[in-house]
């Protein structure tokens, strides 16, 4: 029995030594938990659309910043996001709602970004024509409610209440409509240069009652990026109608379970 124990111990030591020797593949150490969260809003909204999520994340001790997306051109929107990411002091989770999934996908290669979270958001590949991709799915009802004043687009009040935020109380939805910021036509022609989801852990909250981005398209994008995904019985604005579920998904991405 003594010889057997010595033999076993020697084998174990040899195995450990081999695993630690140069040139031997080892599992990477887990990334440190994020302490910063950067949120980016989409079309028909401004940074206040995160008003129910921010306090939940701050209560858990996170440094939270809501980017004011200029809604002018995609390069300018990505640059605005990068400037905020530059100010973060360590690992950061980057979160995008709706159109800003384009921004998250491109700006997410920033070295401070450790994970991406998409909330009913666009998630194109690098250089992909998102409009062409979306044409393979049913046209969402909200598209018919977009109005243009020259180069500026916005959602009509009727479409906003019926298609954008139908599961909010009417008073709350009207307040959200009041802060709607118009977007420039040029914004919709932009294509992402990078696809950060190909190299960063990604998470996706699918809205099953969405009338802005087709739910089938959301499921396709989440599956393509191999995202950790959840499905919420929500309109397009789950960040306001289901803030707890959205916040918990973001917390998962930080490395601290929600």
Image (cartoon, rainbow, N blue to C red):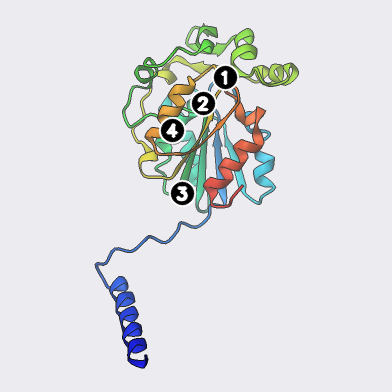
Q: Residues within 10 Å of mark 3 (few under 14, many from 20)?
A: many
Q: Circle 2: is it few (<14), some (14-19), or many (20+) Cα within 10 Å? A: many
**Badge 1: how crowded within 10 Å, few (<14), some, or many (20+)?**
many
Which residue does the numbered mark 3 point to in the structure image? 112
In screen coordinates, is 137 left or right of 155?
left
Distance, label 4 to label 2, CA atoms, is: 13 Å
Residue under pointer 4: 222
On the question of residue 55 being in view, the answer is yes
Could you tell me how far apart the alpha carbons at marks 2 and 1 are, in whole angstroms?
10 Å
Q: Which mark is residue 91?
A: none
Q: Secondary structure at mark 1?
A: loop
Q: Which label sits in the foreground, 2 or 3? A: 2
Between circles 4 and 3, the one closer to the viewer is 4
Q: Residue at x 62, y 37 (%)?
A: 245
Q: Position of residue 99 (x, y in %)?
A: 48, 25
Place residue 27 in its image quadrant. Answer: bottom left
Residue 156 vs 168, above or below: the answer is above
**What whole-number distance in Å separates the C-alpha atoms at marks 4 and 3?**
23 Å
Quadrant for the N terminus in the image: bottom left
* Number of disc labels: 4
Residue marked by disc 2: 98
Q: Earlier in the sequence, mark 1 or mark 4?
A: 1
Q: Nearer the viewer, residue 208 or 93?
A: 208
Q: Considering only order in the chain, which callout, 3 or 2, is on the residue closer to the N terminus?
A: 2
Label 2 vs label 3: CA separation? 22 Å
Identify residue for label 1. 44
The Cα atoms of the two marked residues, 1 and 4, are separated by 23 Å
Nearest the viewer among 166 and 189 is: 166
Q: Eyeballing the image, is 111 above or below 45?
A: below
Q: Is residue 33 left or right of residue 125?
A: right
């Amino acid at each position: 029995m003594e010889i057997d124990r010595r033999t076993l111990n020697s084998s174990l030591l040899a195995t450990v030594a081999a695993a630690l020797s140069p040139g031997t593949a080892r599992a990477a150490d887990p990334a440190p938990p994020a302490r910063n969260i950067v949120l980016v809003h989409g079309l028909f909204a401004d940074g206040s659309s995160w008003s129910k999520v921010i306090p939940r994340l701050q209560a858990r001790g996170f440094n939270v910043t809501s980017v004011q997306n200029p809604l002018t051109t995609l390069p300018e929107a990505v640059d605005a996001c990068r400037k905020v990411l530059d100010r973060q002091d360590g690992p950061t989770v980057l979160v995008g709602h709706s159109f800003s999934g384009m921004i998250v996908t491109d700006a997410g290669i920033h070295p401070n970004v450790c994970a991406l979270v998409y909330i009913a958001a666009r998630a194109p590949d690098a250089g992909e024509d998102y409009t062409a991709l979306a044409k393979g799915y049913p046209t969402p009802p909200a598209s018919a409610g977009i109005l243009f004043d020259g180069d500026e687009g916005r959602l009509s009040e009727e479409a906003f209440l019926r298609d954008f935020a139908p599961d909010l109380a009417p008073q709350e939805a009207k307040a959200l409509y009041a802060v709607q910021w118009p977007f420039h036509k040029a914004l919709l022609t932009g294509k992402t240069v990078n696809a950060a989801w190909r190299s960063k852990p990604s998470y996706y909250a699918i809205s099953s009652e969405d009338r802005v981005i087709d739910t089938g398209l959301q499921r396709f994008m989440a599956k393509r990026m191999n995202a950790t995904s959840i499905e919420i019985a929500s309109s397009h604005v789950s960040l306001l109608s289901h803030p707890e579920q959205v916040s918990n998904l973001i917390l998962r991405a930080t490395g601290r379970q929600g």
